[in-house]
Image (tube, rainbow, N blue to C red):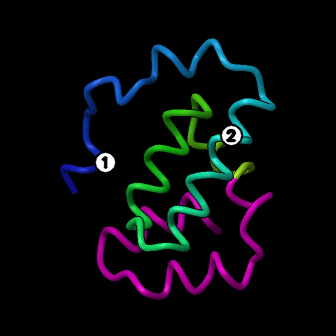
Amino acid sequence: MALFGSHHDLGASMFKDWNEEQQREEIGKLVEGYRNGVPVGILCKMAETIAGSQDKAKEHLAYFMPAEERQEAVEKENGGLRTLIESYLL
């Protein structure tokens, strides 16, 4: 669970100056990365960092990922990580 604990910037200072369109474009690239093997935990945490909040990250992820794909991503996880991924994707 350390992946989701306190983080060391992860570029947040750069992303906070981006407009919604720039954030969405970058999160779209992350979704493509996920589809090519980037772990879902990294997808979710980086989406939150870029978007500035978990709620905004969730909106962007829902825009790029159909409900079925999000559900499949959650079902691949277990335990606490599953619960956390659910909070981003469902």
**Quadrant including the N terminus:** bottom left
Residue 12 as seen in the image, left or right of residue 61: left
**Quadrant including the C terminus:** bottom right
**Residue nearer the viewer, 10 or 48:** 10
The vertical placement of 9 against 50, above or below, is above
Circle 2 — which element? helix
Q: Quadrant of residue 35?
A: bottom right
The residue beneath circle 1 is 4
Give the percent coordinates (x, y) of residue 65.
72, 68
Which circle marks residue 56 in the picture? 2
Q: Quadrant of residue 52?
A: top right
The vertical placement of 21 against 71, above or below, is above
Distance between mark 1 and mark 2 Cα atoms: 17 Å
Residue 67 highlighted magenta (yes or no): yes
The vertical placement of 21 against 54, above or below, is above
- Compare marks 1 and 2 and give the one earlier in the sequence: 1
User: Amino acid type of disc 2?
Assistant: Lys
Tally of marks: 2
User: Amino acid type of disc 1?
Assistant: Phe
Residue appearing at x 63%, y 46% in the figure: 27
Residue appearing at x 56%, y 22% in the figure: 15
Which circle marks residue 77 in the picture? none
Residue appearing at x 49%, y 73% in the figure: 36
Give the percent coordinates (x, y) of residue 44.
49, 54
Residue appearing at x 48%, y 56% in the figure: 43
The segment highlighted magenta reads 61-90
Residue 74 highlighted magenta (yes or no): yes
